[in-house]
Amino acid sequence: MLRTQSCDVAIVGGGMVGLATAIGLAEAGLKVTVLDAGSQAAVEGEPRLRVSAINRASEDLLKSLGAWHLLDRERLAPYGRMQVWDKDGMGRIGFDANELGEDSLGTIIENDNIAFALAKRAAECDNLDYREGVRLSRLAFGEKEAWLTLEEGDMLSAALVIAADGANSWVRSQCNIPLTFWDYGHTAIVATIETAEPHQDCARQVFLPDGPLAFLPLYQSNLCSIVWSVTEPKAQALLAMDDENFSKSLTAAFDARLGLCRVASERIGFNLRMRYARHFARHRLLLAGDAAHTIHPLAGQGVNLGFQDAAAIIDTVARLKDDGKDIGDYRLLRPLERERKAAAQEMIATMEGFKRLFEGNNPIKQAVRDLGLNLVDKLPGLKTVFIKQAMGR
């Protein structure tokens, strides 16, 4: 028998941002349903390829939601230092959490570890209905509510729909929300790497002429996750190499900072594209996380930007509910949309500026970036600003 149910908020997408938003709204007293096309499972065995550099602001959010302590603690990799340098220049900068009296700048965590912890926390919330393996067939919006039809025919009505279903968002497409986008001209190669020397809980990034290479420390002292952004032709060449030759190329590109590198997993490449939805909100609709924006991974801020979306949505919708107002009224959601669009625009512009400044070997650009890196490294006040920014403070 087909059923029709109702809730305050329907969230499409059960990834990190969607689940975090759901938990926060449920804790605020709203009746929430999460519709997840996939499912979450415990992380076991070898390190997963997709990891995130969770800054302290995102850590605070996960703690406030009661999910942080549910993470698999043995798979967390807090890092207290960062080193950044220009491959072909003299510019370099180092960040240390001790300079601010902190024990870490952030934590490298497998995305699946975060999602599973959030799913466990969601299961503890009385007024949160988390449904896995569910797909939508139709979405319609009315003046007073929205209707979501599941593939098996059941229907759900909600005062507000939140699209957190990723970069290729089905909800965004169904709502005909246009995208501003451009191709970065880069492919990101991700892999797990075993290094001859321990990473010492330090995140490292080198700017090469054709793109940045990041080594992110994992929970084992000689394992790192890499994100190597290169042009498409070079990416194809690197992916076509056998493990031995790829490891040699990687070691050379990284200046052998951690000794000889050895590939310890499969290698995957994915094209990098900036996406920015023209609308983050409509009547009875909000976009969050990658459904609203995707950015270059060179500073590792994509997931943190999504968690900022979640925190802002939780705050706004909970306040509207407490004030007895219509949580899906676009006029009341408009300030939230302006705030999140401005934050996304700032991050997109910053990433594009960094990418353009650090790509290529133009001697003028090289002089500017070397001067900039060294200047920031030697000015304590300015350096503190950058450290706080990296931490999300």
Image: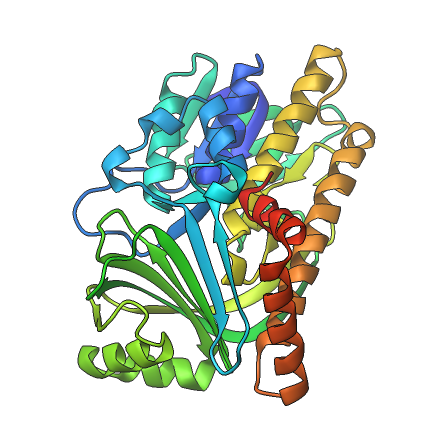
- Report the residue at 57% width, 84% height from top: 360
Query: Which residue is located at x 71 percent, y 23 percent?
Result: 327
Q: Is residue 55 visible?
A: yes
Horizontal and vertical percent position of residue 238: 33, 81
Residue toward you, 340 or 282 = 340
Rendered view: 245 above or below 349 = below
Q: How many discs mark residues in the rendered view? A: 0
* Position of the N terminus by quadrant: top left
Relative horizontal placement of residue 347, taking residue 104 as reference (left or right): right
Nearer the observer, 112 or 391: 391
Q: Is residue 355 above or below residue 132?
A: below
Residue drawn 65% across and 28% down? 160
Residue 195: which quarter of the image? bottom left
| Foreground pick, 352 / 382 | 382
Residue drawn at (61%, 81%) of the image: 366
| Nearer-the-camera pick, 42 or 105 | 105
- Residue 42, percent across and down? 24, 37
Image-quadrant location for residue 362? bottom right
Q: Is residue 133 visible?
A: no
Where residue 106 appears, as percent x and y from the top left, is 44, 43
Quarter-of-image position of residue 183: bottom right
Q: Quadrant of the C terminus?
A: top right
